Image (tube, rainbow, N blue to C red):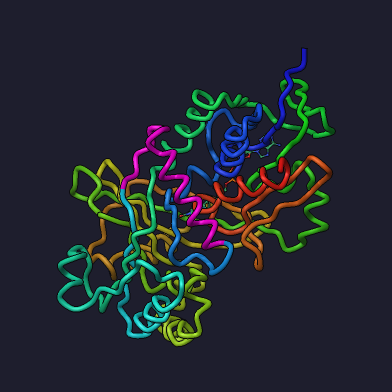
Amino acid sequence: MERSFDLAIVGAGIVGLAHALAAARRGLKVVVVDRDTRANGASIRNFGFVSVTGQQAGQTWQRARRSRDIWAEIAPKAGIAVTHAGVCVTARRPETVATLEAFLATQMGEDCELVAGPALAARFPFLVGQQAALWSPHELRVESREAIPLLAAHLECDWGVTILRGTTVHGVALPAIETSAGRLRADAAIICPGDDFTGLYADELKAAYPQLTRCKLQMLRVRTAAAGPDLPCAVMSDLSVVRYLGYAELPESAALRARIEREQPEQLANGIHLIVVASADGTRVVGDSHHYAATPDPFGDTDVDELMLDEYEAVFGTRPPVEARWLGTYASLPDRPMLRERIEGRVRLVIVTSGTGASTAFAIGEETIAEMFG
Ligand SMILES: Cc1cc2nc3c(=O)[nH]c(=O)nc-3n(C[C@H](O)[C@H](O)[C@H](O)COP(=O)(O)OP(=O)(O)OC[C@H]3O[C@@H](n4cnc5c(N)ncnc54)[C@H](O)[C@@H]3O)c2cc1C
């Protein structure tokens, strides 16, 4: 007999799981179907950096605040460790300081502060060569390769969500969901395929979003001498201030961009900025670069890794050994952070089209479920 559900979700990345949580909280009977036998997509390849400060002003920033609150609420229930909180955005140029000062004057600067002078070394003794740093208390960091499986287990054990792995969804014609493991029945469906645009509703996506593409990122894990997490917060740098739209859209960032174009053109050409987060085993995750293509090549470039390490060295004064390297890809649109398509009455397609899914998916899930189920 076919198994029946109120809602079928395709994709067990953070976007699919976030929708499952929002639906289960409303009492819906939910199935999540994923073709992989374990988490393998962008959601476990990222920093696990749930970032708020620096997200684009408006809806993305608001979604990040709401999603951060949900992460904080469910992490202890799901057994997910929060490695550290907050972010320190370093400034080694006066133009960066000016941009961060302008940011502080916006609504988004609430509870943030600029740390400079003797206080800088006292608060952030691991930094070298910086003029100042913006401190934001809003961020959380989880270890994604552990957090995503723990979140899935929490949904199964505590919310009664069914997760079918190693199962590809071939088609949706409600109430039928055709999968590689047979037919399911569901009253509604939400497709959260990450950056796979070649499967379900490929023609609709191509017609509606001809600029939809993919972004390839290079990531590093470096070894420090510490036995445990050796940073109290995430760390970003000048390059992040011209990349993260919450800062980059401020008029004050124009002078910074002009200076970085002169001084670090290779980093800009490779879409490099700096995020560093600490892990429980004494390693740090360092990234990242951004290269755009419909089908990105599958090869890492060691020159790009060295450019990232140059930026790391400019902030920390050391060049630690690299323990692991990996690539990730995410969906990308030039002008919108996410898309939610109404395919038909009870079918939605949801894709985060910027590198913000870990930071915004929980809020996006709540919105979709509220729109579909009232
Ligand atoms: C290297 C890297 C660093 C990042 N850093 C950050 C960060 O610091 N902060 C942040 O907020 N975001 C970050 N992001 C972005 C974030 O990771 C993504 O936005 C988010 O993970 C996308 O989640 P998703 O669920 O849509 O995709 P995925 O995690 O890729 O999941 C999609 C799932 O759908 C499944 N699927 C697709 N089609 C089918 C089908 N037909 N049948 C069954 N299953 C199917 C796939 O198997 C896959 O498991 C980063 C991304 C990368 C790659």
- Return the x and y of residue 326 as percentages of the image width and height: 45, 48
Query: Residue at image x 69%, y 55%?
Result: 339
Query: Residue at image x 37%, y 84%?
Result: 98
- Return the x and y of residue 125 as percentages of the image width and height: 17, 64
Residue 370 lies left or right of residue 188; in this view the side is left
Quarter of image, res 354? bottom right
Q: How many marks?
A: 0
State whether residue 167 is above or below residue 280.
above
- Compare residues 237 and 2 and report the one nearer the observer: 2
Residue 249 lies left or right of residue 123; in this view the side is right
Query: Residue at image x 46%, y 85%?
Result: 252
Q: Which residues are magenta?
A: 60-83
- Return the x and y of residue 85 as percentages of the image width and height: 33, 53
- Magenta region includes residue 247: no
Quarter of image, res 304? bottom left
- Visible residue check, residue 230: yes
- Compare residues 265 and 202 and report the one nearer the observer: 202
State whether residue 367 is above or below residue 12.
below
Residue 32 lies left or right of residue 372; in this view the side is left
Q: Quadrant of the N terminus?
A: top right
- Compare residues 166 and 234 and report the one nearer the observer: 234
Quarter of image, res 59? bottom right
- Return the x and y of residue 184 as percentages of the image width and height: 75, 23
Q: Quadrant of the C terminus?
A: top right
State whether residue 365 is above or below residue 103.
above
Query: Residue at image x 53%, y 25%?
Result: 156
- Visible residue check, residue 298: no
- Residue lying farthest to the top in this orientation: 1
Residue 351 lies left or right of residue 72; in this view the side is right
Q: Main secondary structure of the magenta part?
A: helix
